[in-house]
Image (cartoon, grey):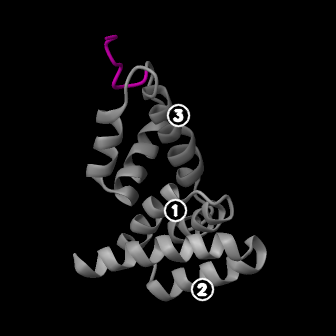
Amino acid sequence: MAKRAKTPARRSKAYDEGMRIRRRWMGKDYVAKAFRDADDFTIDLQHFVTEHGWGASWGRGGLPLKMRSIMSLAMIFALNRPHELEIHLRAALRNGISKAEIKELLLHGAVYCGAPAALDGFRVARRVLAEANAG
């Protein structure tokens, strides 16, 4: 098995900021697991997402992180990506987005994305909310 590169060849300011925001928003354990589970095929994707998604996008300023989170939830919902929706819903709850705001986002999205997306989105959200209430 090939040795895994756990850090990018050159760490940029966007990468460092992305790692800081990603850990804050998604949780240190989640981020550590993402890198730990990466192999020689997927490690570059973790670096790419950290630098470009979390650093260059989330870290650029101009919008509050809560607004970026709501926008991300809406886009992930529209793309019907239940796994990513689940992950971002957990982060949103941990970072101050309320159950009522999530409900409104999903209802509003139903108008533009359709009933199948709304049914899937509500199913995922109900599971995440139940887990959050149990824990």
- Judging depth in this view, the residue of 83 and 60 nearest the camera is 83
Badge 1 amino acid = Leu
> Please, which residue is most extreme toward the left here?
135
Closer to the camera: disc 3 or disc 2?
2
Q: Which quadrant of the figure contains the N terminus?
A: top left
Please indicate, yes or no, whether residue 60 appears anywhere in the rendered image: yes
Quarter occupied by the C terminus: bottom left
Could you say which disc has been placed on residue 104 in the image?
2
Residue 96 in view in this figure: no
Is 125 located above or below residue 75 in the figure? below
> What number is the disc on residue 85?
1
Q: Residue at x 44, y 70 (%)?
A: 92
Disc 3 marks which residue? 48
In front here: 72 or 10? 72
Please tell me which residue is depicted at 35% across the width and 51% down the height of the picture. 23
Q: Residue at x 67, y 58 (%)?
A: 79
In this rendering, would 119 be left or right of 37?
right
C-alpha gap between disc 3 and disc 2: 32 Å
Give the image location of residue 73, x and y in percent.
57, 66
